[in-house]
C-alpha cells in the first residue's frame, strides 16, 4: 500500500478496517493487501505494538520485501532502534521512505557520520515537498556532531529561513564555543517562530510559548556558560512553570538547575531531580546527556549525606563505563568525606594501574589528597611519577615550590635539571628551555649554590652572547666567587657611549611639556626669592572674630570647666529629688508656713563660722549685684543627707485616711 494511506483521517481508517479488512480477512486470512491495510490503519491510530504483532503473526505472507517499511517504523516508534536498523538493512529494495527512516534510525543510534551521508544522498536524489524537512534534519546532524563529538561543522550553505534551521545553527555554534553568535541565532529563531505561528489563527499564545520553550532553554544554557547564573536560573524556572509536555526538555532544565545549585539549596535540587526520572526520558536524550544526569544524581546524593545511595549510583556508572574517570572520583570524594583518605588513595591507585590512559588525572588527585593530609614529600613523589608532565613549566614550578617549603633544595634543583635535560634533548630551541635555565640559575643563586648557578648562566650566555642582562648576572655571580674572572668578563660589557640613548637634549628641553615645567619651576623659585627678600606682597591675615559673650558675663568668675557637658554627665550631679517641689508647698503639718524657716536655720546666723565658699557661689560674688548665668557657675553641692527610702505601698492598699 502506498504511503498516502498514512494520511487518512481516523474516521476513514475505521471505515477501512471495517469495510475492507474484516470481510476480506474472514474469507481469506492470508490476504496480503487486507493485512497490509490493517497494519497501516493500526499505525495511523498509534497502535504500533498491535500492528507489529499482526506483521509477526503473518510473517510468511508479509515478508520483508512487502512490508519492511511498516515493520521498521513500528520498531522505531517502540524504541527498538537496533531491530529497526536490522529490518531496514534486510530489505531487498531501498526505497525513498526506507532511506528517510534509515536516517532517523542512524541519528537515534548516534552514528552521525552515516546519518549525514544518508541525508545528503536523500537531498541530492529527491525532489518533493519534504525538502525543507530534510535540510532541517541535516542541520540537526551537524549540530549533534559539533556538540557531542567536537567536530568542526562544515558550511552546508543552507538558507536559514525557518526557526528550526536557526536553532540548529545556534546549537552548532555552542559546540564551537561561540556563545555570543549562538545567542544572536537563537534570538532570530525566536522571532521567526513567533512570526510563523502567529499567522495561524488557531494557535494561541500558550501554544507559541510552548514552542518557544526549547529555544528559551538553550538561551538559558548559554547564560549559564557565560556565568550569568541568576538570569539562567530565572529563565529555567519560567520554562518549568509552563509545564511543557517534552519530558526530555524538562529533564535537561532540571539537571542544569541542579548544577547551578551545587551543594546549596539542596531541597530544591531534590525536587528537580524527580523530573529527570520521568518515563521516556531515556529515549529523548543522548547517551552523554543521560550520563551527565546520572553523575549529578550521584553528586547530589553525596552532598545530601546519602553515602549508600552515592556509592550505589557511582558503582552503577562505573559498571556502565569502566574506563570513565568521574565515577571513581565521586567514590574517592565520598570516602574523603567519611575521613577515609588512605582508602580513597588506594582506590585511585588501583584505577590508575588498570587504566594507564587516565593515570595522569588520577595521580594529580592523589597528590592533592596527600597535600591535604600534610604529606608534601609523598605528594611530590606522586607528581614526579607522571612522566608526561615532568617537563611542563607548571609542574616544575609546583614541585620546586613544594620542595622549597620542605627545605629540600637538592630535590628542587634535581627537578630543574631533569626538565632542562628533556628540553635539551627534544626542544632545545624552545624559549621554555632558556627560561628554565634562567629560573634554575636564579634559584641556585638565592640558595647559595653559586658555582652551579654560574654554569647555568655561562650556558645562557654562550647561546646568546649579546644578552647584556645574562652577562651582568654572570659577572655578579663571579664577583662573589672569583673577582678576577668577574673583571675579565666585565670587559665584554658595552661602553657607555653605545649604551647611551641618542637624544637631542635641546629639543627635549624646548618641547611644550618641558617648557611648561621649567616656567612653573622658575615662577616658584622667584616667589621663594621674593619671600626671602621680603619684597613680595604679603597677604593680609584675616582677623579672627571674637566670640560673643553672655550678657551677664563676669570676667572675675572662673567658668565651670564642665559647662559643655550635659547635666547628667557632670561630676557633681546628684540626680533629681523626687517628690520635692520648688516652694515646698504643702510640706509639714496643716496650717504651718515656711516663711520663717530661714530665720530658724542656725547655719545662716552671724554667730556660725563662715564656710569656705565654692567657686561661683553666692558668697563669692556678693560684691556685685549682677546675677551669674547657670552655665558660668558651679552649683553648690547638695547637703550630705541620706535619701529616704520610699516605703512600698502594700498590694491592694488605697490612699487617703
Image: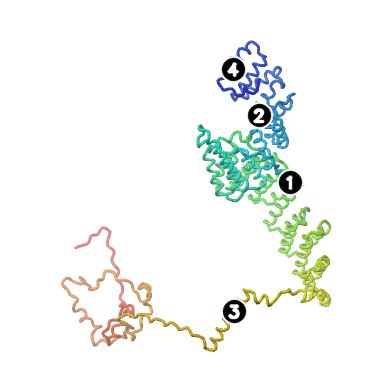
**Comparing marks 2 and 4, which lies closer to the viewer?**
2
Residue contact between numbered discs 2 and 3, judged by CB atoms under 8 Å: no
Image quadrant in which you'd find residue 505: bottom right
Lower sequence index among marks 2 and 4 = 4
Label 3's element? helix
Residue contact between numbered discs 2 and 1, judged by CB atoms under 8 Å: no
Label 4's element? helix
Q: Residues within 10 Å of mark 4 (few under 14, many from 20)?
A: some
Closer-to-camera residue (78/649): 78
Residue 83 visible from this viewpoint: no
Lower sequence index among marks 3 and 1 = 1
**Comparing marks 4 and 3, which lies closer to the viewer?**
3
Q: Position of residue 181 (x, y in %)?
A: 63, 47
Residue, far top = 27
**Comparing marks 1 and 4, which lies closer to the viewer?**
4
Give the residue pinned by disc 1: 351
Q: How far apart are the two marked residues, 2 and 3, measured between alpha carbons?
A: 87 Å
Please indicate whether residue 542 sits to the left or right of residue 313 in the image: left
Q: How far apart are the two marked residues, 2 and 4, measured between alpha carbons?
A: 28 Å
**Comparing marks 2 and 1, which lies closer to the viewer?**
2
Give the residue pinned by disc 2: 128
Residue contact between numbered discs 4 and 3, judged by CB atoms under 8 Å: no
Q: Position of residue 45 (x, y in %)?
A: 59, 23
Q: Residues within 10 Å of mark 2 (few under 14, many from 20)?
A: few
Closer-to-camera residue (525/294): 525
Lower sequence index among marks 4 and 3 = 4
Amino acid at each position: 500500500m502506498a504511503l498516502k494511506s498514512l494520511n487518512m483521517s481516523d474516521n476513514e481508517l475505521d471505515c477501512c478496517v471495517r469495510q475492507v479488512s474484516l470481510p476480506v480477512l474472514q474469507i481469506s486470512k492470508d490476504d496480503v493487501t487486507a493485512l497490509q491495510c490493517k497494519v497501516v490503519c493500526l499505525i495511523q491510530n498509534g497502535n504500533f505494538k498491535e500492528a507489529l504483532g499482526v506483521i509477526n503473526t503473518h510473517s510468511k505472507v508479509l515478508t520483508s520485501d512487502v512490508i519492511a517499511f511498516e515493520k521498521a517504523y513500528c520498531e522505531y516508534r517502540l524504541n527498538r532502534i537496533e531491530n529497526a536498523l536490522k529490518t531496514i538493512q534486510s530489505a531487498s529494495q531501498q526505497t525513498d521512505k526506507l532511506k528517510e527512516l534509515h536516517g532517523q534510525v542512524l541519528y537515534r543510534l548516534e552514528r552521525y557520520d552515516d546519518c549525514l551521508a544518508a541525508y545528503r544522498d536523500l537531498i541530492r536524489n529527491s525532489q518533493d515537498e519534504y525538502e525543507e524537512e530534510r535540510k532541517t534534519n541535516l542541520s540537526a546532524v551537524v549540530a549533534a556532531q559539533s556538540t557531542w563529538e567536537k567536530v568542526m561543522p562544515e558550511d552546508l550553505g543552507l538558507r536559514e529561513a525557518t526557526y528550526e534551521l536557526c536553532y540548529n545553527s545556534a546549537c552548532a555554534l555552542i559546540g564551537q564555543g561561540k556563545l555570543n553568535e549562538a545567542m544572536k541565532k537563537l534570538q532570530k529563531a525566536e522571532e521567526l517562530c513567533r512570526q510563523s505561528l502567529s499567522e495561524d489563527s488557531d494557535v494561541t499564545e500558550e501554544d507559541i510559548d510552548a514552542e518557544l520553550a526549547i529555544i528559551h532553554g538553550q538561551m538559558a544554557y548559554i547564560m549559564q556558560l557565560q556565568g550569568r547564573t541568576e538570569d539562567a536560573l530565572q529563565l529555567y524556572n519560567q520554562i518549568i512553570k509552563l509545564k511543557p509536555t517534552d519530558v526530555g526538555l524538562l529533564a535537561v532544565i532540571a539537571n542544569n538547575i541542579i548544577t547551578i545549585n551545587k551543594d546549596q539549596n539542596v531541597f530544591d535540587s531534590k525536587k528537580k531531580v524527580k523530573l529527570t526520572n520521568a518515563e521516556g526520558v531515556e529515549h529523548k536524550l543522548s547517551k552523554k546527556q543521560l550520563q551527565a544526569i546520572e553523575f549529578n544524581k550521584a553528586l547530589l546524593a553525596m552532598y545530601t549525606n546519602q553515602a549508600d545511595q552515592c556509592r550505589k549510583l557511582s558503582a552503577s556508572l562505573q559498571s556502565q563505563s569502566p574506563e570513565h574517570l568521574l565515577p571513581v572520583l565521586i567514590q574517592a570524594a565520598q570516602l574523603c568525606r567519611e575521613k577515609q583518605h588512605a582508602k580513597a588513595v588506594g582506590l585511585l591507585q588501583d584505577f590508575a594501574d588498570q587504566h594507564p590512559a587516565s593515570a595522569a588525572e588520577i595521580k594529580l588527585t592523589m597528590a592533592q589528597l596527600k597535600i591535604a593530609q600534610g604529606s608534601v614529600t609523598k605528594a611530590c613523589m606522586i607528581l614526579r611519577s607522571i612522566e608526561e608532565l615532568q617537563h611542563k613549566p607548571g609542574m616544575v614550578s609546583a614541585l620546586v615550590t613544594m620542595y622549597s617549603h620542605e627545605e629540600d633544595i637538592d630535590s628542587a634543583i634535581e627537578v630543574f635539571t631533569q626538565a632542562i635535560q628533556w628540553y635539551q634533548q627534544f626542544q632545545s630551541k624552545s624559549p621554555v628551555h632558556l627560561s628554565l635555565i634562567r629560573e634554575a640559575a636564579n634559584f641556585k643563586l638565592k640558595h647559595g649554590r653559586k658555582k652551579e648557578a654560574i654554569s647555568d648562566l655561562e650556558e645562557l650566555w654562550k647561546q646568546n652572547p649579546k644578552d647584556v642582562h645574562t652577562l651582568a648576572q654572570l659577572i655578579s655571580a663571579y664577583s662573589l666567587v672569583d673577582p678576577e674572572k668577574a673583571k675579565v668578563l666585565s670587559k665584554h660589557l658595552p661602553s657607555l657611549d653605545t649604551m647611551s640613548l641618542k637624544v637631542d637634549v635641546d629639543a627635549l628641553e624646548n618641547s611644550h611639556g618641558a617648557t611648561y615645567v621649567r616656567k612653573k619651576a622658575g615662577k616658584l623659585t622667584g616667589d621663594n626669592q621674593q619671600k626671602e627678600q621680603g619684597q613680595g606682597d604679603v597677604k593680609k591675615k584675616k582677623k579672627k572674630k571674637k566670640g560673643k559673650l553672655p550678657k551677664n558675663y563676669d570676667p572675675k568668675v572662673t567658668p565651670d570647666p564642665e559647662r559643655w557637658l550635659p547635666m547628667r554627665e557632670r561630676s557633681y550631679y546628684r540626680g533629681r529629688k523626687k517628690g520635692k517641689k520648688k516652694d515646698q508647698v504643702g510640706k509639714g503639718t496643716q496650717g504651718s508656713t515656711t516663711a520663717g524657716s530661714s530665720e530658724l536655720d542656725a547655719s545662716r546666723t552671724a554667730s556660725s563660722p563662715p564656710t569656705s565658699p565654692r567657686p561661683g557661689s553666692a558668697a563669692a560674688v556678693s560684691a556685685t549685684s549682677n546675677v551669674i548665668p547657670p552655665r558660668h557657675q558651679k552649683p553648690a553641692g547638695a547637703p550630705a543627707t541620706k535619701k529616704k527610702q520610699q516605703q512600698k505601698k502594700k498590694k491592694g492598699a488605697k490612699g487617703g485616711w
